[in-house]
Amino acid sequence: MSVRVQQAKDKRTTSASVRSRVDAYLDGTMVGKNPLRWYITGWRLGLIAVIGALIFPQVAGSQSLIVTAITIGIYVMLALGLNIVVGFAGLLDLGYVAFYVIGSYTAAVGSFGAIQLSNNQIVHIPIFPFWLLLALGAVLAGLFGALLGAPTLRLRGDYLAIVTLGFGEIVPTVFQNLPYFYGQLGISALPPGDINLPTGTISFSNPLDYSPFYYLTLALVVLITVVVILLRDSSVGRAWVAIREDETAAAASGVNLVRTKLLAFGLGATIGGVGGALNAAFTTSITPLDFNFIISITILIMIVLGGLGSVPGVIVGAILLRFFDVYLLGQINDWVHKFPLVANAGTPLHFLAAVDFNASKYLIYGVILVAMILLRPQGLIPNIRRKMELKGEGAAPESFSAVGIVEREEQGLSMGGAGSEDETLYEGAGSDAQRQEEGGE
Amino acid sequence: MSTPENMLELRGVSKSFGGLTAVDSVDLDVKRGQIFSIIGPNGAGKTTVFNLITGIYKPTAGDILLDGLSLSTLTPDRVVKRGITRTFQNIRLFNNMTVLENVLVGLHTTLPGNLFSIVLHLPNYTRAERAAHERAIELLSFFGPSLVDRRDEYAANLSYAERRRVEIARALGAGPKLLLLDEPTAGMNDAETAEAVQYIQQLRTAFNLTILLIEHKLQVTMGISDRIAVLDYGRKIAEGSAAEIQQNEQVIEAYLGRKATVE
């Protein structure tokens, strides 16, 4: 709609002016303040990134860089998945590694085609193609995500974090101790089978050329990113944010808390399962010891670094941290150790020669995390909402309300004494939120 | 007991928290199309009654019926689907969402729940989403052009009176037949209060609503209520028209204390 038409409409009577604004809004829906426009502008950058990623193997030069890029891609998936749970829905999940394990073991057991009974007898099971296992790993992880999410529905904040932390510890231990999975020895997995095309064969297991596997990872990352963006901009994404903001108000607006939270857990876990299956097919050997708490934390640091709830931020965070971990850290280590002031005995910085920077990885992560929280808590590429929240602009003016005291008294009664909160799911949620508000007043 | 003109019925509803009885066998009959007010001193259990009706709390005893069907076992979102929505005493908007998004959350029940059509943005979803956008703007425009203009503003940045209105627009989103307003004029000055009273009355006719109201300001309640119930210490001590309530000894006592008797 042209500006002049709208101005003409604005000149009419009040009710007509309201109507015209409504019209202007609706006319503008497809070009103006609409997610669609965002897609067009935002996707330009995305497109550039994808094109860059597509030509990367040609310019990378070394296979080790491509291998690094593949592991980065797997972590980008994991970060995107965890971001649904923590960033969108605001449910602090410290046990995300559980779904990574489930995806990995599904792919490994299915491609290895054998399980070991407790009397060491080997039972051969059907061997499935990787593509099926990828889907199976995703589905199984998603189911377990919803299953593990169900008992945590009544929990919030710290309590939720502790329970999910427990899940993250339990699941790898289960795989270690159940007889079928060869305990600490772990299982081999197979990479995707060769694809025969008229133009030639695509091999995913050629140690001299990892680019097919790289493109497979890239395709999955792009697919997952698109799905996550579509989810974020849908009614489900809105419901997640509403739950994060105020659970009771969300429920009172018609949002089904159980369904919406389980959807977050389940979809996050599904993506974790895809990452796991891909990881198994790439490393071709997994042991329970590969999966530990520190993986959950690393993914969490990635999304905090990039910006909680921000899709581009989370991707950048995962790329930076993983690149730092698998490539840059080793380079820094070599560089520092070769530095003349360090390498030669008697120089002032010689003590650094004894420091292994690879071993100090988590110390450096810790420094990064603390620095981010102090200097830029909203992340590198912040989600607009979070940015406002953290700057304190989100503080509700009701704090200044003259009825604050009245409200508190009324709430104090409706909350009742201790023990009332656990009576139903919603009571717990409601009184918890009320307590937060009381604290704020 | 259920008669067609009764929309909402509370039958001996009680709620206790541990040893404290917040609501003590309260009976209410809210008739279709009424503006029904619940008044009472602080801590009388008015908001608890709202929380019981909307499923946030479950009654310890008694039953709540909407059009003859029990609500007392439903979760809050199911209560919304049955046609009851509410606002909160202390305005619980989603502060870091825009005005429009807040109202869209209120329209959540009108959107399809099928995950596939949502993720793939299938036509049935995009159509419903577009209709929800139109409806949200319409609801905001009920309160005049200013909220429509500020639809992309974060809810936290609005004035107090505007926030009240957005909360009501959000509550209207699900297309309720019964609207629960918890102190809609709390914290407002006289001019804002008068305006609020006016739009509450307009809401009833414009959206064909029955309104259940908690209000502290007696001049508001007395002016617009068809019927008033008075709660004190969780019990209903009186019910009747505004005139009846003003004459009621118990009500005067609850608000002002016992009259000194000169012997």
Image (cartoon, grey):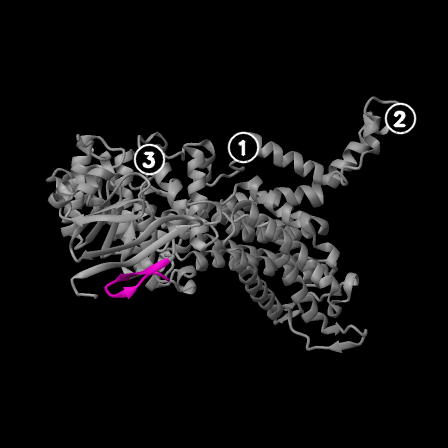
For the view shown, which residue lies furthest in the front direction? Answer: B263
For the view shown, which residue lies furthest in the right direction? Answer: A345
A296 sits left or right of B213 in the view: right
Give residue B14's quadrant in the image: bottom left
A128 sits left or right of B172 in the view: right
Pick whichever, A148 or B241, lies toward us.
B241
Image mark for residue A376: 1
**First reached walking from the N terminus: tag 1 or tag 3:** 1
- How far apart marks 2 and 3 lie (CA) works out to 73 Å
Q: Residue A118, how many percent across, how many down?
A: 78, 72
Vertical comparison of B117 with A420: above or below: below
* Label 3: which secondary element: helix
The residue that label 2 is drawn on is A345
The residue that label 3 is drawn on is A406
> Is residue A415 among what the camera can see?
yes
Q: Amino acid at mark 2?
A: Ala
Pick whichever, A331 or B231, lies toward us.
B231
Q: Residue A392, how many percent across, how many down?
A: 44, 32
Q: Chain of mark 2?
A: A
The stretch of residues the image draws in magenta is B61-73
